[in-house]
């Protein structure tokens, strides 16, 4: 009798083990549900982003004009880029514009964010007002600014020689109008980022520093700015990257003129690649520009993250 009972138990245990093994094998063969949600996005990203990038890099080693036959030319497109005065001028303008616009955007945005974070009336209303420029179409606003700079400003400031004529026709000062438009729109997003950072700082730190007699400037220098270092890093990196790729404000205000004085790298790539018969040449320029932006962004992260503080 005991032997029969043990045999039944052994058989039941063996059956249970087989069922558990079969269940594990079935579950290992069945893909989790999230895979079926991720794969369509991965395939779409590869089809509409990765594949075109690979094709573009391939054509950068040819003399393809965007139509007709083509031949391999090796690295000649990349070599010629460093000899092209127009390309070098576009890079110089893009970096000058980006550096000035980044500095102004972060100074103005941080000042406004500090003001909005203070105890002022209708704080939420003003937050919404300052975010409006970010949701407006830049080309539409650009044409409004174009009318302002070319018609309204010369009449309002007719007594100032610089603004007596249309500033957009000046090779020396046209870029400042583009900076004004770009900074005006970029501040909207940067203000939101800074406000998010300011709200993470405990109020107790300011109360303790006030008891120790710290001035508002000392509080900003020793408490506020170090503790929003991560948000400052994000704003600076995103601002510089975005301003290096400036396109819409230039098209709306000057279209790269007068001459080529306000022609950015992105505008040069667009013109030469799509309407100038320089598809392969400007694709090589785009590859170089991508590398430049990547290196600059990584360098910014490396330098700025050292100054961040935690609490």
Image (cartoon, rainbow, N blue to C red):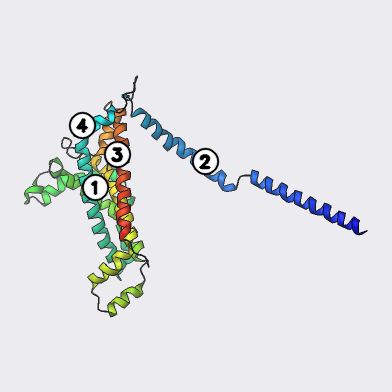
What residue is rendered at 87% in x and 54% in y?
A: 7
Q: Secondary structure at mark 1?
A: helix
Q: Secondary structure at mark 2?
A: helix
Using the rendered image of the protein, determine whether residue 256 is visible from the camera's viewpoint: no
Q: Residues within 10 Å of mark 2 (few under 14, many from 20)?
A: few
* Nearer to us: label 3 or label 1: 3
Marks 3/4 in contact by CB < 8 Å: the verdict is no
- Give the mark, 4 or 1, whose residue is nearer the N terminus: 4
The N terminus - image quarter: bottom right
* Nearer to us: label 3 or label 2: 3
Marks 2/4 in contact by CB < 8 Å: the verdict is no
Toward the bottom, the furthest residue is 211
Q: Secondary structure at mark 3?
A: helix
Q: Residue 40: give its label.
A: 2
Query: Whole-percent x and y of residue 202?
Result: 36, 71
- Give the mark, 2 or 4, whose residue is nearer the N terminus: 2
Q: Residue 153: give its label.
A: none
Foreground residue, 227 or 104? 227
Residue 106 vertical placement versus 166 (above, below) = below
- Give the mark, 3 or 4, whose residue is nearer the N terminus: 4
Q: Which residue in the structure is indicated by mark 1? A: 98
Q: CA distance from mark 3 to mark 1?
A: 14 Å
Q: CA distance from mark 4 to mark 1?
A: 21 Å
Q: CA distance from mark 2 to mark 4?
A: 42 Å
What residue is rendered at 28% in x and 29% in y?
A: 77
Q: Residue 84: give its label.
A: 4
Q: CA distance from mark 3 to mark 2?
A: 30 Å
Marks 2/1 in contact by CB < 8 Å: the verdict is no
Residue 207 vertical placement versus 161 (above, below) = below
Q: Which residue in the structure is indicated by mark 3? A: 289
What residue is rendered at 23% in x and 70% in y?
A: 217
């Amino acid at each position: 009798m005991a032997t029969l009972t043990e045999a039944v138990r052994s058989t039941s245990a063996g059956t249970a083990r087989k069922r558990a093994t079969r269940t594990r094998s079935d579950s290992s063969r069945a893909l989790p549900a999230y895979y079926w949600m991720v794969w369509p996005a991965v395939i779409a990203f590869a089809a509409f982003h990765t594949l075109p990038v690979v094709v573009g890099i391939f054509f950068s080693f040819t003399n393809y004009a965007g139509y007709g036959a083509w031949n391999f030319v090796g690295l000649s497109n990349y070599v010629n880029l460093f000899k092209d005065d127009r390309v070098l001028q576009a890079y110089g303008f893009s970096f000058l514009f980006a550096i000035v616009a980044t500095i102004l955007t972060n100074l103005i945005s941080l000042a406004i964010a500090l003001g909005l974070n203070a105890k002022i009336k209708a704080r939420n209303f003003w937050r919404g007002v300052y975010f409006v420029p970010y949701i407006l179409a830049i080309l539409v606003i650009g044409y409004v600014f174009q009318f302002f700079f070319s018609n309204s400003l010369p009449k309002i400031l007719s007594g100032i020689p610089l603004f007596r004529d249309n500033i957009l026709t000046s090779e020396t000062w046209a870029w400042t109008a583009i900076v004004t438009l770009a900074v005006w729109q970029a501040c909207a997003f940067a203000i939101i980022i800074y406000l998010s950072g300011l709200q993470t700082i405990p109020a107790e730190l300011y109360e303790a520093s006030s008891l120790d007699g710290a001035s508002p400037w000392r509080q900003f220098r020793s408490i506020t700015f170090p503790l929003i270092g991560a948000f400052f890093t994000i704003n600076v990196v995103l601002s510089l990257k975005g301003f290096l790729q400036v396109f819409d404000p230039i098209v709306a205000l000057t279209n790269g003129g007068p001459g080529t004085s306000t022609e950015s790298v992105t505008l040069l790539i667009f013109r030469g690649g799509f309407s100038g018969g320089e598809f392969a040449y400007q694709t090589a320029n785009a590859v170089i520009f991508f590398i430049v932006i990547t290196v600059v962004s990584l360098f910014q992260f490396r330098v700025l993250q050292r100054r961040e503080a935690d609490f």
